[in-house]
Image (spheres, coloured by chain):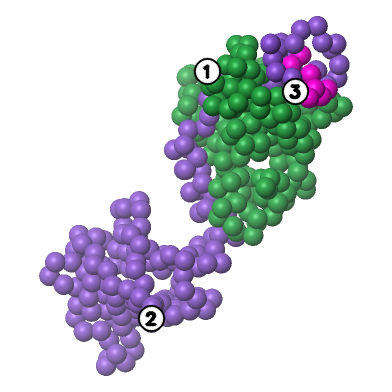
Amino acid sequence: VSDPSDPDLVRRCLAGEEDAWRLLTERYADLVHGVARRAGLDAERAGDVVQEVFVALVRSLGRLKRSERLAGWIAQAARRESWRQVRRRRASRGREQAAARPEAIREPLPDATLAALEEEHLVRMAYGSIGERCRRLLDRLFVSGVELSYAEIAAELGVAVGSIGPTRQRCLTHLMRELERLGLRPDAPARRRPEKEA
Amino acid sequence: MAPQHPRSPVADAFDGASGRARGRAETGVVRFARRVLVARAAGLAAEPCPRPIMRRVASLLHERAPATAIRLLRLLFDSLHAPVPARRGRRGARWLRFGAEGVALDVRITRLRGGVRLEVGLEGPRPRCIELRTAGRDRGAPLALSAGGTAVARVARTAKDVRIELRLVSGRRFRTPALPLRD
């Protein structure tokens, strides 16, 4: 069973389902935290960003026009809040002059970085939907950084060598289906700047 | 030698993008597979949001979400201020009644030598949970409701006040105002 889509999750949150809020937090906390950390904030301030973004989300959830663009909304909100925290940090370090002229300071995260983080989030979600066995196999095959033979992978995962090929095929099909469901397709352009409003 | 298995353009693309197979043409599918693998590797290398932060946020959302906002139970009766003298609680015992939206909660507060005894009676839909929240403590203590909707708890004499909070199966939450336990 697939995880609920963002629009479903938003509907459930608005209906007051406690589990939906927990799921929403688990789904997006890494994205927000990643944006804050990439913006150069320390762990404590990154935690503040996560908190502020989700509180803003609670206030805005009922007004989101396109809940399928929730990831974009959250990424933008995380960037804004991170930027605010960066300016606060600079101000507290005695750089009031710089903080008072924000136009003189570049935004902490360029559009391309934000788009890459959003894509990273969607890929994480897709991998999260294909099951532990598939995740481990695909990571060993394609992301481990070391080119392992099928025999080595089979031994590591405790499966027959002959099952690797068919399982890989099945897992990739599942992964591609999940990616497409999330709007990532080979014929779709790489993600650009997220929309201002979801 | 790798075992024989069915080939597919997608599997070939991931082989090519990851470097497991060399010399693959740079098709759109290969470029897409590379994007996916780059994002996956970055995601694995990224520092996840720490669990304490997630717990803090989940708790905040639960408190602030409009649909799960806590409704305050209104005070309907207080024996300490009852207009009829005969109904005023005797010294050391106080009876309070709260209500809102089909939920009624009776609380009898009795001072004992070693602490304060609370007797609770609930009318209305049976809650998913009912908790006693003592001032100065982060976590509430669950009250064990009998089949008849009553519960008894004892609170330390040092406690300044308590609140009773309950959550219905529907998700609606109610809370009494702070009930002072000292003079």
Q: Main secondary structure of the magenta part?
A: helix
Looking at the colours in the rendered structure, which chain would you say is drawn in green? A
Q: Chain of mark 1?
A: A
- Residue A39 placement: quadrant: top right
The residue nearer to you, when weighing B27 against A57, is B27
Q: Position of residue B159 (x, y in %)?
A: 24, 60
Q: Which residue sits at x=53%, y=29%?
A: B48
Q: Residues within 10 Å of mark 2 (few under 14, many from 20)?
A: few
Does dot 1 land on a helix, a strand or a loop? loop
Q: Residues within 10 Å of mark 3 (few under 14, many from 20)?
A: some
Q: Chain of mark 2?
A: B
From the viewer's perspective, tell me whether residue B12 is left or right of residue A108: right
Q: Which residue is mark 2?
A: B148
Looking at the colours in the rendered structure, which chain would you say is drawn in purple? B
Does dot 2 land on a helix, a strand or a loop? loop
- Residue A50 placement: quadrant: top right
From the viewer's perspective, tell me whether residue A29 is left or right of residue B175: right
Say the numbered circle drawn on residue B5: 3
